[in-house]
Image (cartoon, rainbow, N blue to C red):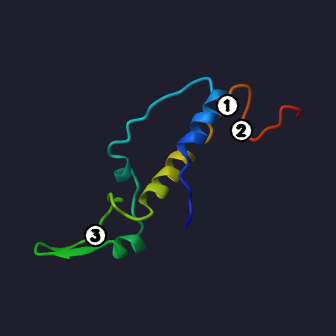
């Protein structure tokens, strides 16, 4: 799975087109992502206290940041648009 993180310079350049800005505190954001049955098995670990499986996405997974960013993008999809219209629309149409 590939989901490239946006470059900060590109984001700053695109900010000119937006009217409103906000800051979201996502301190426990990874905990909102449920693990599938398959990923629970893959990320399981054993220690002196027993065998454990993550029910929610822990920090440190290789693709965790991309999965979380995609989840946020999907959640905000209808709310994020530049001044005067939606992204991808031509001014002529």
Q: Is residue 76 visible?
A: no
Q: Neighbour class for label 2 at 10 Å: few (<14), some, many (≥20)?
A: few
Q: Is residue 21 above or below residue 52?
A: above
Q: Residue at x 74, y 30 (%)?
A: 85
Quarter of the image for residue 53 reads bottom left
For mark 2, give the secondary structure: loop
Q: At which x and y percent is residue 70?
A: 53, 52
Q: Earlier in the sequence, mark 2 or mark 3?
A: 3
Foreground pick, 33 / 85: 85
Quarter holding the N terminus? Answer: bottom right
Cα separation, mark 1 vs mark 3, equals: 42 Å
Q: Is residue 25 left or right of residue 5?
A: left
Q: Which quarter of the rendered picture does the C terminus lie within?
A: top right
Q: Are marks 1 and 2 in contact (CB under 8 Å)?
A: yes
Which residue is disc 3 drawn over? Answer: 53
Residue 69 coordinates in the image, percent (x, y): 49, 50
Name the image quarter holding residue 90.
top right
Residue plotted at (11% across, 72% down):
49
Quarter of the image for residue 61 reads bottom left
Q: Is residue 85 above or below residue 59?
A: above
> Residue at the spot x=57%, y=35% of the render?
12
Q: Earlier in the sequence, mark 1 or mark 3?
A: 3
Is 59 placed above or below 79 here?
A: below
Q: Residue at x 33, y 61 (%)?
A: 60
Q: Position of residue 5 (x, y in %)?
A: 53, 52
- Disc 2 marks which residue? 87
Q: Nearer the viewer, mark 2 or mark 3?
A: 2
What residue is shown with label 1? 82
User: Compared to 54, does 42 lie above or below?
Assistant: below
Q: Given contact means CB atoms under 8 Å apart, are the residues at marks 1 and 3 in contact? A: no
Residue 27 is situated, as x and y percent measured from the top left of the image, at 33, 42
Taking the view exactly as shown, the residue that stands out farthest to the left is 48
């Amino acid at each position: 799975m590939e989901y490239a993180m946006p470059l900060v310079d590109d984001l700053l350049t695109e900010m000119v087109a937006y009217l409103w800005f906000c800051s979201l505190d996502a301190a426990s954001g990874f905990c909102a992502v449920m693990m599938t049955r398959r990923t629970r098995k893959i990320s399981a670990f054993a220690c002196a206290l027993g065998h454990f499986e993550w029910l929610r996405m822990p920090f440190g997974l290789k693709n965790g940041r991309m999965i979380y960013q995609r989840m946020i993008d999907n959640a905000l999809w209808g709310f994020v648009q530049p001044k005067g219209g939606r992204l991808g629309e031509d001014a002529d149409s």
